Image (cartoon, helix red, strand yellow):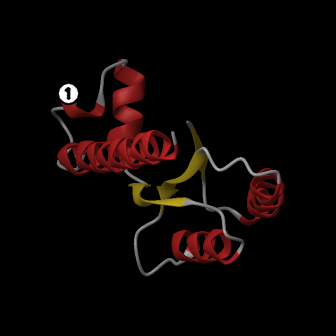
Amino acid sequence: MLVVPAKPESTATDGLTSTLAKRRECGNDHYRVLLTKVPPKPRTEGEQLRASLVENDIPVLRAEMPLLVAFHKASAEDIPVSDVTDDRNAARAWAAYASAGKELIKWLKSQKAKANTAQ
């Protein structure tokens, strides 16, 4: 299982889409894209990237990492974002990670069930 982080910026999106589409064509779908540093509404870069990936049949997690200062604070302090105490968005940031983790675990369990059924 590979989680591919993708930041919604136009310069990287075309290469990402092309590379992952080729990977999918080769029959390798043991990966999911995780949108990161997604800016808040009304900006639409995250939605646009998600739409582009889905349009190209690239598997994307429903969860996404919002663009929050709490992540930078956690990195600077070398702690998990759940331990950041001086940012009101730290809990929201941690909830985003938890959501992505739960989604990945659910997907992995479904893959294991498919493999067991195929045997």
Q: Residue furthest bottom?
A: 42
Q: Quadrant of residue 54?
A: bottom right
The residue indicated by pointer 1 is 83
**x, y (%) of residue 71?**
38, 39
Callout 1 amino acid = Asp
Task: Please state if 66 lies on the left or on the right of 54 as rendered.
Answer: left
Q: Residue 94, image x and y in percent?
A: 25, 42
Name the residue located 34 percent from the left edge and 20 percent from the top edge: 77
Residue 108 to residue 26: above or below: above
Q: Nearer the viewer, residue 18 or 108?
A: 108
> Foreground: 106 or 34?
106
* In the depicted structure, whether residue 74 falls above or below residue 119: above
- The residue that appears at 51% across and 39% down in the rendered structure is 119
Res 17 → quadrant: bottom right
Question: In x, y percent, where is residue 36?
Answer: 51, 52
Q: Residue at x 23, y 50 (%)?
A: 89
28 left or right of 30 in image: right
Residue drawn where x is 60% and y is 54% of the image = 7
Give whichever of 117, 67 is nearer the camera.
117
SS type, badge 1: helix
Toward the top, the furthest residue is: 78
Up the image or down, 37 lies above or below 39; here it is above
Judge whether 77 appears above or below 94 on screen.
above
Quarter in which the N terminus is drawn: top right
